[in-house]
Image (cartoon, rainbow, N blue to C red):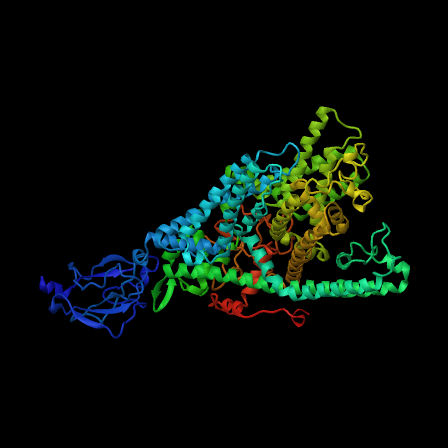
Amino acid sequence: MSSSADSNPVIVIDVVDDESSTENVIHDGVPSKNAQTLAEANTLSVGNTSNNISVETLKIPPPAKVSKERLKLGNDVHKSTTPTSSPASARKENSSTVQIVKIETPSSSPSSYRKRHPSKEEDLQHLTEEDLILAETLIKDAETGRNFTYKTDPTHVRSYIIYHKWFFRWGLYLCILLNLSLALFEAPTRKGWELPYWGTMLIEISCLILFIARVIHCAYFSIPSIFWRDTKNIMVIGIIILTILDMICYVIWVNQAPDSNPVRWSRPLRSMLIINFSDGRQIRRAFRNIRRTVPEILNVLILFMMSVFLFALLGLKLFGRRQSLTYPDGTEYFKNYFDSIWDLYVLVTTANNPDIMMPAYDENNWFALYFGVYLIICLYVFMSIVLAAIYNNYRNNLKNEIRDAVFGKRRKLRQAFKILNVTRNGEEIMTKTLWTTIMRRVLPNKSLERIELLMVILDKDGKGHINKRDFLNLINLLQVPVSEVQERQTFLEKKIPDIYNHKVSNVIKICVRHKFFRIFFDFMIFLNAWFIGFDIDESDWFFLSIFMFEIVMKMYVYGPKEFFRRVWNIFDFVVIFGAVIATAVESGSGKGGEELSTLDLLLVLRVMRLIKIFVSIQRFKVILMTIMNIGPSMATYGGVLFVLYYMFAIVGMEIFHGLITYHGYEETNPSDMFCGNPKLNGTAFYRNHYCNNNFNDILKAFVILFELTVVNQWHVLSSGFVFVTNKAARLYFFIFHMSCVIIVLNIFVAFILEAFILEYSLQKTGRFESAVESKIKELGLGIGQSKKRKGAPDIDQMELVSNEQEVDRTPPVPGAQDDSTEDSESDTDSIPDVSNERGLRFHLKKKSRKKVEVLLQQMFEGEINPDDDNDEMEIYYKKKRAVTLDAVT
């Protein structure tokens, strides 16, 4: 037995049981070309010394995959005994001992080495279920932009995940909306709408209970020192406490002195909850930008107001002593200093120009120089500087907000990478096993092939693993639209593929996908507009049938799912089928003649589709694309204005409700005359029929505040409430104008300017690309391509689609659109025919519609150090910042 062993030794050798296993297998005691000789190893004697078998050990990082396989060398089978390495459960930061087997026999060939490769289990041995949950949560935080700092133990992480469940989030939204809507049913309100105060308070208490539970839940998983330093948490707690105190005071007030006009002074604070709950991230960011901008433009505003004060003093001296100077209605002209300041402030808004100048101008034509110089300095110079200062500081603050967002995402991803990574050859990496494990949690509904393809995109160097810098591009990768062919197949193609792919059906698909199909129906819209303009009603049903045919054909070719992904298709569907229903109802009821036809209205709306045609015209494209891109962000600033409107509306209702009422303008009852208040007799407010502009309920208050925002005649509107109260009411309108018009609307203008400049730059220089998009283009694989570019990764059953500027030199798929030549904004473009395609697709539109904030983030990413987390921002905010005239001009 011993001699047999000497002549034909048999050794158990660990080999790799994966796709690369054949690269390292030892054949007849001779290592393959990939087996490496390891130096500086410790030699240990093992087993029978007559066989001269030795084992060398070397410390290397834990590998990725392993399986046990017995290779027989000779006729007999013997098991070799080798010393074991450190436990498999050792953490990744500790180097593990891996076995290297050297076989020496008297008749053997030169020494042979074989490295033991790690298994999938060893890749994951340093991770627990809690580690995976935390890493998954951090990645989702980065994806959604959540910037929470929370306790990372399993209990608190699970609590954090529950906090962000959609039903709790929507429950919060519902309670905020319900809390704000109480103003519709609380006094003062419309007749018949008022509810008992205890009824509205019960609803408010229910909302407060959820708000308190939300705050307690957030405090539970948050780090206390950070939670109590967070301004938004302090604001929410303060609002809740003040509201409870106000409710107690109001109940006592109503029961003890019901006739003394009790006031709910905490109601204006309700809208602040929109900002300060963590779910109102976008609106809070806009308010934070405003808060940071105001101090930096304060110097300019102070100089502007000083100029108004100076000219008011000069006007008082020029015109105040002239008894002959009065306004046409007999009121005093520059007789009071504060009245002069108010009149000149209104003049800056041009609302009372040239009314304020005419009395002095009639007295002496040279007085026009005073008003001309004033307008040049305060209107054209200072107001322009205010806008320039706001724009300059807004852009800097916007850039810093984006940097903060980038830093926040990087911190989350680095924390996740630190949890997941393993060490190989002194480098921290994420293996394929780790990547697949975590991404199956982050993207639970995605296929394994798609997850593997995402790794190929991140693995820029093709090493088979992901390093930390590549992992930081994960968020950009998840923002790239990815779809599988089966997801792009239409309903009919899945259910009846033989009929859908029949020759006749293919001809229909080619016709519908052709650009002349769109051109024909665009022409029909022009023709329909012409018939509507000349009031030819007999053509309505003809055009209605034509447009219904267009919709049916598109839905057949592209499928309902793809059809309804485009806004214009939804618009067409609603308008056309709404017209069919309206026409059927009108025909059944017998209405007609001179009555307004709903069909006419809907067909006129259909003509709005002509806007799409203008998008294809270069000179209109920048403007229209800017409008489409700033749409979502406009909603954010709409939320900012809503918060301010709500606060000013509640305050205005408490001050001015019931003082002005609307009873028509042919009143016979003396108590209803002059807007229900004799103090308005002979005023411009009553002469202009402004009685319906009042603060008697929340809806009317919103209307008048919007009119004040538009500025025209705002001084007349404000004068009506001054007449029924006193001149101190001007302070309310001055603060509103300064807050909403000069600051918020100018910041909104600055945002539009930034968006327009960005869109214009994109049209001239090309679209900004993220690192992920550049990698996809570099691979250069598209629909219909049969060969991958040289050097591209080998991915089974996977292809990438690049619809950018590059020319696809491969034969086109029959019936597919050429996105490089077509307008991607069309509802029939960018929908390639995938009937003959298989695998995955990256579909990058030539003119992808991204939010302006995403484009700005991509634009500013190049200015941020890839290894920087937040140190630059900490230094920035510690610096003392001051805005001077030199800094903003």
Q: Give the answer, above or below, for where 319 lies relative to 541.
A: below
Locate residue 637, reporting x and y percent: 62, 52
Locate residue 618, reporting x and y percent: 71, 57
Front one among 860 and 543: 860
Front one among 824 and 258: 258
Instruction: Point out the image quarter for the N terminus.
Output: bottom left
Q: Give the answer, above or below, for where 87 lies relative to 716.
A: below
- Residue extending farthest to the front is 256
* Relative side of 667 to 708, left or right: right
- Asked where in the image residue 850 lies, by quadrant, the reply is bottom right
Residue 795 at least partly seen: no
* Relative side of 645 to 381, left or right: left
Locate residue 742, reporting x and y percent: 68, 57
Front one among 265 and 710: 265
Instruction: Point out the image quarter for the C terminus.
Output: bottom right
- Residue displayed at 24% across by 57% down: 69
